Image (cartoon, rainbow, N blue to C red):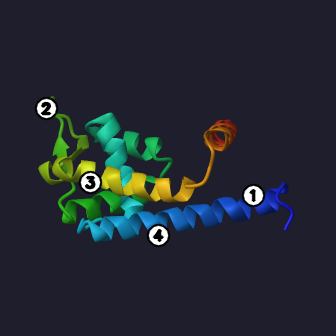
Amino acid sequence: MKLDTPKSLAYLTGKAHLLLRAHTQHYINREGLALPVDLSPVITALQEGGELCQQALAEMLLADRHKLSRMVDHLEILDWVERRRHQDGGREKFVVLTDKAHRQQEILERCILKAMYEATTGLSNLERRVLTKGLVRIIDNLYCY
């Protein structure tokens, strides 16, 4: 396979994504956290953004509102998030991390970092910088559309 074609890049990024998800889920399971890896971006976004309305959360994650609502439903059942009305008494509900999520966020972060460390083992610092710059460029390019 030629490594400099869009087809090979699509294959390799897709494969890397699947393997990173699997390895991250392995570490999450090993730590005994009841959390599907596909829901972890919601936790990460709330860690960064604090309490967010579902619309803002969907935009932040580039997710369909209906899909995000189902993800939040699932996270509520698992006691990782809860929906609350804003203090101003408005109708809009905000999504916030529960105490359980706050207690376990360090463990979750450690699981994600272990998987990323495994994925980048053997790369030189220069290769890591080039990879990071390439991924940033891809993200920037895709935000333009």
Which disc, if any, is residue 87?
A: 2
Q: Are marks 2 and 3 in contact (CB under 8 Å)?
A: no
Q: Are marks 4 and 2 in contact (CB under 8 Å)?
A: no
Q: Position of residue 130 (x, y in %)?
A: 68, 39
Is residue 22 toward the left or the right of residue 30 in the image? right
Q: Is mark 2 on a helix, strand or loop?
A: loop
Amino acid found under the numbered disc labelled 2: Gln
Q: Position of residue 8 (x, y in %)?
A: 78, 62
Residue 142 visible in rendering: yes
Quarter of the image where one finds residue 115: bottom left
Amino acid found under the numbered disc labelled 3: Ile
- Above or below 39: residue 91: above
Q: Which residue is drawn at 61% across and 43% down?
A: 128
Q: Which of marks 2 and 3 is nearer the N terminus?
A: 2
Amino acid found under the numbered disc labelled 4: Ala
Q: Name the residue under label 1.
A: 9
Q: How far apart are marks 1 and 2 (CA)?
A: 47 Å
Q: How far apart are marks 3 and 4 (CA)?
A: 17 Å
Which disc, if any, is residue 22?
A: 4
Is residue 78 toward the left or the right of residue 41 in the image? left
Q: Name the residue under label 3.
A: 107
Q: Which of marks 4 and 2 is nearer the N terminus?
A: 4
Q: Position of residue 119 (x, y in %)?
A: 54, 58
Instruction: Give the quarter of the figure containing the C terminus.
Output: top right
